[in-house]
Amino acid sequence: MSPQGFADKVAFVWRVADKLRGTFKQHEYGSVMLPLLVLHRMDAVLADTKDAVVAKAEGWTDINEGQDYMLKSIAKQRFYNTSPLTFAGMLHDDKNLALHMGGYIRRLSRDAYRVMEAYNLDEKLTRMERAGILYGVVSDFADLDLRPSQVSNEAMGYIFEELLRKFSEMSNETAGEHYTPREVISLMVDLLLTGQTLTDLVENPKPVRTVYDPAAGTGGMLMGALDKIREANHGAVVQVYGQELNDETWAIAQSDLMMQDISPDQMANGNTLTQDRFTTDRFDFILANPPYGVDWKGYARPIKDEHEKLGFHGRFGAGLPRVSDGSLLFLQHMLSKMKPDGSRVGIVLSGSPLFSGQAGSGESEIRRWILENDWLEGIVALPDQMFYNTGISTYVWILTNRKDDPSLGLVRLIDGRESGSKMRKSLGDKRKELTPDAIADLVRLYGGAMGEFADDPRVRVLPREEFGFQRITVERPTKDEDGRPILKRGKPVADASLRDQENVPLPAGFFDLDESQREQVLIESAEKHLAEEIHPYVPDAWIDHKKTKLGVEIPFTRQFYVYEPPRPVEEIAAEIKDLEGQIQQWMAGLGL
């Protein structure tokens, strides 16, 4: 399909949507137009085999598994419809159009009907019928040529995704829950396809790559990855998989796959954290934009059970974050899906997972586990105001279990906070965007962080130990009236009121040591800190090493902090004097 033909079909549906005005709110338009588009496309795809399917299914009331397989074979599709009606044919009885459409939908094959049911289309058809707009909307759709001979599966996917984007932006007050801006997806996928990963993809004549999103939303990340991989190598076979909790959002993602003849089994419905639908699967690329700060208290029991009973044989062995934010649960789940021979993981997170939780907390232990395994390759800070329903700072984490040699033991940080361009028209909280040039620049910095761009002020490459510390407990003795330490069994008794805690940086190469070496190195490092930093001021202090805890946090912004000296006192004084003179002139003008 030509670009003009693609644009014409998108514009056509967009114009039809205008008929919903007054009956539906703008944020509801997509939930009406998208399922109608899917229904019309299915009708067009099934047209050639329609009569054969209807004839074969005549008299069948409850279609069993064998019959379902047979009808799909006759339809030569992953779905079928046993209704003798067609999308256009239903218009011949305008007084019973809603009734006929409901029956037509219920005669779809099981998987296809489940998708349409999740859209809750029956209720919307009733609303349109009562408002007197149903016939006009459906008849307009019937004029849209979606035959496979005119619109390929790939082109249909592009049309669907473009409409989804436009409707999502129209409903910006809720879009952020399910829709990630396209430019963020583009950046994430480009970051995943760097270095040897891209080289292997390009040089292989027919590579097979699997992509997985455990918080798939409307499927935008999966489709973005699929398109980018095919763009890099037209011979690539890309298999996408996802899971989504929200029923209607799942239906949208499932519809997009159906439009491109992708198996419905590859888009699961349900809570990824409690009902993993891909328990034994591993993937080449794993990417997600999980919900920020979502409370998981309501379904905590199965997660805690998996943590306690399975440990590292399950998904959450490293630890559990606070119940007010499940982001790091998603990250652990994603890391459990890596292939032993190498996968790449990309996830969008808020600032909280970088540093929330004290030493020894679930969050800190999860970060420590990631660094100990040397999986964190890099983090890119995004501009604020990039998403539809939040203006908070966000970060793209890139992780892999197959780092190249120059990256071993190191973490690259890229500061892209100033890379955003202001939009001419804001969409909810989204007021900034990343242009293609900005994306290319960030990817260039990321890829060259270990070499040619290592000295760029927006780049930091740090050893992983830089983010770890030991939280030591410093004790001081309880003293008697004469100021002498009180002893018990020959040792001074600690005064709890004078107890203090300090963070001591981890020694270089700490994560490369075995457990026995680590303990000794920590004690030596802590005692050195005591002698050099504490004893000069508090000579009787000591460290209770039994209370020491390891902590990990990633203070991203601190790494890029640039000290700005205060203005000279003389300059400030001169400015104040000028302001006083102006005020006196104003007062004189008022006759005061």
Image (cartoon, rainbow, N blue to C red):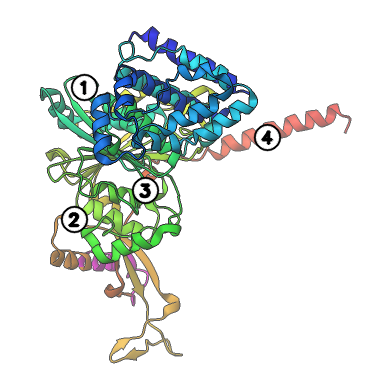
Of the numbered discs 1 and 4, the one sitting upstream in the chain is: 1
Mark 1: which secondary structure? helix
Q: Nearer the viewer, mark 2 or mark 1?
A: 1
Location of residue 164 (image quadrant): top left
User: Can residue 437 be seen from the camera position used here?
Assistant: no
- Who comes first in sequence, dot 2 or dot 3? 2
The numbered mark, 2 or 4, whose residue comes first in the sequence reads: 2
Q: In the displayed structure, does residue 249 sit left or right of residue 367?
A: right
Q: Earlier in the sequence, mark 2 or mark 1?
A: 1
Residue contact between numbered discs 1 and 4, judged by CB atoms under 8 Å: no
Asked if residue 537 lies in the magenta stretch, the reply is yes
- Local packing at callout 2 (Cα closer than 10 Å; few below 14, some 14-19, many 20+) is some
The answer to whether 74 is drawn above or below residue 406 in the figure is above
Question: What residue span does the magenta drawing correspond to?
Answer: 524-541
What residue does disc 4 label? 577
Q: Earlier in the sequence, mark 3 or mark 1?
A: 1
Residue position for label 3: 555
The answer to whether 423 is drawn above or below residue 539 in the figure is above
Q: Residues within 10 Å of mark 3 (few under 14, many from 20)?
A: few
What residue is shown with label 1? 232
